[in-house]
Image (tube, rainbow, N blue to C red):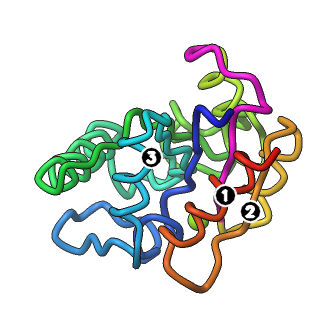
Amino acid sequence: MIKCVFFDRDGVLIKNYGYLNNISKLKWLNGAINSIKILNKKKIRVIVVTNQSGVARGFFTEQELKKFHSDMNYILEKKKAIIDTFFYCPFHPNGKIKKYKKNSNLRKPGNGMLLKAMKKFKLHPSECAMIGDQKSDYLSAKKTKIYFEYKKNYALDIQINNVLKKFNDK
Ligand SMILES: [Mg+2]
């Protein structure tokens, strides 16, 4: 039984502009909102796991990042969808901001965010799937023994329905 889908944020749910933190520029990718809706309806947890080194680099603050995520959910709620939880990694070894300048297993390809989420919500790897668009996403999932797919070039909701089918057929 699938209980949770982990999504990378940039390039999977929303358009990747690089260090985006301006809500007016946010663009949902095709099928992303409907994917979240589908999972919400089935009571499958929707969790974002995102590297946000823009915090370490001084492009935006952690507070601004949190605001961006709550604004994402504000937009989703109007469409009757919700992201249950956001996990983000603000750290980067070459960061400018001292507080965030460090190596961290939270940062993908590390699997700290996945481990944290699984512990918090008592999830087994076999109950989870992850969609990402970078090798670091794949490696993070692989380390955690979580089923992974790269985001396909077609609508995300079609892909999500296929993933759900695969789990049902198991
Ligand atoms: Mg990405």
Q: Is residue 109 above or below residue 154?
A: above
Q: Position of residue 136 (x, y in %)?
A: 76, 58
Q: Which residues are magenta?
A: 120-132
Helix, strand, or loop for circle 3? helix
| Label 1 sits on residue | 163
Instruction: Residue at 70% x, 46% y: name it.
Output: 168
| Label 2 sits on residue | 149
The amino acid pointed to by label 1 is Val
Residue with the most extreme left position = 78
Q: Position of residue 103 (x, y in %)?
A: 73, 37
The amino acid pointed to by label 2 is Glu
The residues bearing labels 2 and 1 have C-alpha atoms spaced at a distance of 9 Å
Front tag of 2 and 3: 3
Q: Taking 59 as reference, is 116 left or right?
A: right
The amino acid pointed to by label 3 is Leu
| Label 3 sits on residue | 39
Confirm if mark 3 falls within 8 A of ligand 1: no
> Where does ligand 1 appear, by image quarter?
bottom right
Marks 1 and 3, the one that precedes in the sequence: 3
The reply to whether discs 2 and 1 touch (Cβ–Cβ < 8 Å) is yes
Marks 2 and 3, the one that precedes in the sequence: 3
The residues bearing labels 1 and 3 have C-alpha atoms spaced at a distance of 11 Å
Q: Quadrant of the C terminus?
A: top right
